Image (cartoon, helix red, strand yellow):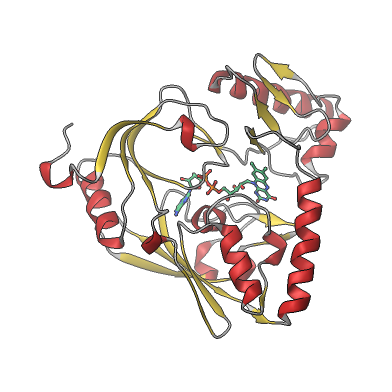
Amino acid sequence: MTIPEHLQHLIRSDEPLAPLVWLGIGGPAHFFAEPVDFEQIVQVVTWAAENDLPTRVLGSGSNLLVREAGFDGLVITLGAAATSALSINGDRLTAGAGGKLSHAVVKAVGGGLGGLEHLVGIPGTVGAAVVGNVSSGGRDIGSAVERVRVLQNDGTIKQFDQDEVGFTYRKTALDGLTIVEVDFKLEAADPVALTKRLQKLWIARNAARPADIERIAMPFIDPDSMPARELIQSVGLAGIREGNVALDSARPHYLVAHAGATSDECLKLIDRVREQVLLQTGIDLQLNLQIW
Ligand SMILES: Cc1cc2nc3c(=O)[nH]c(=O)nc-3n(C[C@H](O)[C@H](O)[C@H](O)COP(=O)(O)OP(=O)(O)OC[C@H]3O[C@@H](n4cnc5c(N)ncnc54)[C@H](O)[C@@H]3O)c2cc1C
């Protein structure tokens, strides 16, 4: 398929995705666009829909494993200023989906609004955080969401109230849709106390992450019975390796990609862990990592 002339300034072909994802692995996107405003998003998304091309949004790439074959469709990013803006109005924070979650957290705290600070240090964008209902310390992002705006294939916006989003543990019913904006309803609080809390949480989170390692992912969702970290440790899988991919030995809920790592090695390691955990404990570990 060729890119029509009026979209040639917006859409590129065969864009490498590996440099855009944390694991640094994977092939190209057949088509790739970085729209700078809402009008451009609509143009590229409706073009893809008219041509039956699957569309995916790429956030910060911290929860993605891209296969070497790449993605045979359109990948868009929403990191431009117009699609990542943050604004406060009373006790509400409105965030463009391409904005960094960490910026939203800091903006809320600076504006004396509590309710997001427990999410400090979770990598990624607001859109990805909402679609995957990120959580930390037993509290998810969904509890602070008031409304989500999603772009439909015909270029119109559909609004979902919190109770229509289907927030469950690390999941929503919005999977596969393009979130463009989110309203959070927060609670007024003392900015100084909030900042102190934020700093404490930030230090704790940093201490819990493998130091000096860039190419990492957190592949599994914590099962109900115990954190994935303890579970993997308890069955003796900390530090196991598959080619150039390993589980961190101290924090085995993190997967680490070393030089030369491939998506097949990641998938083999993930399968091995799931198989062993199931065999030894009867627990079926579920994936958090999205695979393209
Ligand atoms: C070191 C580390 C620590 C982590 N800690 C936590 C944690 O404590 N809690 C937790 O819940 N997760 C955690 N994660 C997982 C990860 O941070 C989250 O899943 C995060 O939301 C991913 O954001 P991203 O922008 O990088 O998404 P990406 O990896 O780019 O994309 C992930 C998925 O979201 C979709 N997506 C992205 N933007 C949109 C949008 N606008 N509309 C619709 N779909 C969209 C993508 O298509 C893809 O399917 C951690 C990951 C790492 C590497």
Q: Name the outermost residue toward the right.
A: 234
| Residue plotted at (58% across, 52% down) | 171
Residue furthest to the left in view is 5
Of the pair 109 and 247, the residue shown nearer to us: 109
Q: Which of the pair 36/277 is nearer the observer?
A: 36
Query: Is residue 5 positioned above or below 172 on the image?
Result: above
Task: Classify residue 266 by image quadrant.
Answer: top right
Find residue 198 and report its horizontal and vertical position in percent: 74, 65
**Residue at coordinates 71% horizontally, 79% vertically from top-left?**
191
Residue nearest the observer in this picture, 16 or 224: 16
| Residue 11 falls in image quadrant | top left
Residue 291, percent across and down? 51, 34
Front in this rendered view, residue 136 or 274:
136
Q: Residue at x 59, y 70 (%)?
A: 107
Answer yes or no: is residue 292 visible.
no
Total numbered labels:
0
Where in the figure is residue 183, as x and y percent of width and height?
50, 72
Is 14 positioned to the left or the right of 21 in the image?
left
Q: Residue at x 49, y 56 (%)?
A: 127
Q: Is residue 179 left or right of residue 107?
A: left
Horizontal arrangement in the rendering, residue 245 relative to residue 39 (left or right): right
Tell me if I can see residue 98 in this picture: yes
Q: Position of residue 254 (x, y in %)?
A: 72, 35
In the picture, which quadrant includes the N terminus? top left
Q: Residue furthest bottom?
A: 90
